[in-house]
Image (spheres, rainbow, N blue to C red):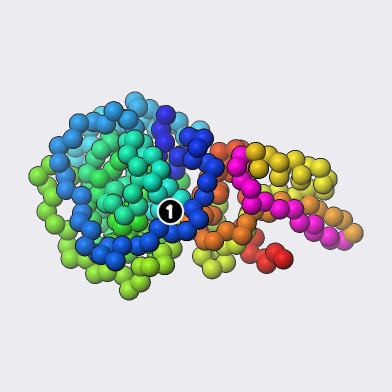
Amino acid sequence: MVSGCSVLSLIPKNIAKLPTGLPKVPKDIANIPDAIPRKESRGRYGNPESYVIFGQHYRVLISANGYVERGIASWYGPGFHAERTSSGEPYDMYAMTAAHKTLPIPTYARITNLKNGRSVVVRINDRGPFVEGRIVDLSYTAAWKLDITRTGTAQVELQVLQAGTDAPPPPIIPPTEFSSPTAPTAVATENLVREHSVRYLQVGSFSALSNAESLVSRLKAAGISNSRLRELRSAGNILFRVILGPLEGPLELDDMLLRLQLIGINKAQVSVESLQ
């Protein structure tokens, strides 16, 4: 079983809850030290020869020596804080950790934001991100130090480090604000909406009330209770829409989209209307 940052919901107990609030950001977040590469045995958990997520096949690398990769980094936080990672360790959004799809667990890597040159060292102890185009999911602190929490994603370079190569990264200039983070935009809406406009998800629209009610029952059975029905009248016709929300922001939106995917609903649409 691979749990990981983007597949924690494969463990039933983890799909039943969403974050009720952001854990308090440490006042000394800028002083949280980078991970220090050290020799560790390949983890007992999180290192299958291969695995499949959402129909995609992944093969875990036998060795990470010399591995360098460039691509998009994102970050994950409250929706997974304290939950089990693929390594079996609880996820700490304020530790210097990260998730990768194929690097051995654990692996140490330097992550450099290619836009601003900031760099951190993280310990990879989880699997993910399972979103096309993204190569690494960072902890909140790692993303904050790289100034990614405000943008959600960034182009980065990932360079695997070995024990004894823990030279300190370049000086980090803290972002102006960090107490109200933003998150990676949701999978289905990455270039469509910003945090202030993400309010609801429409997961279905039916001409028959019974079909809409059946979907609501299906959602509730999966532990998704914040659903409602809304009538839409147009040209004499009535549609019954199934709406989820309100959602507090991109973090909760990403979690909800993932939970919907895991029960076979892949076409949820963002709605910015105000529901009374």
* Residue type highlighted by circle 1: Pro
User: Is residue 183 toward the left or the right of residue 200 in the image?
Assistant: left
**Foreground residue among 103 and 247:** 247
Q: Position of residue 51 (x, y in %)?
A: 41, 29
Q: Residue furthest bottom?
A: 176
Instruction: Answer with the quarter of the image where residue 32 lies.
Output: bottom left
User: What residue appears at the point 57 percent right and 67 percent down from the top-left corner?
Assistant: 197
Total tally of numbered discs in the picture: 1
Find the magenta span and give its range.
222-235
**Residue 81, visible in the rendered structure:** yes
**Foreground residue among 108 and 226:** 226
Instruction: Answer with the quarter of the image where residue 160 lies.
Output: top left
**Residue 74, visible in the rendered structure:** no
Q: Residue furthest top?
A: 49
Q: Residue furthest left?
A: 164
**Foreground residue among 94 and 76:** 94
Q: Position of residue 25 (x, y in %)?
A: 35, 62
- Please determine whether, in this image, residue 173 is positioned above or below residue 167: below
Q: Which residue is mark 1?
A: 78
Q: Position of residue 42 (x, y in %)?
A: 23, 31
User: What residue appears at the point 67 percent right and 51 percent down from the top-left corner?
Assistant: 227
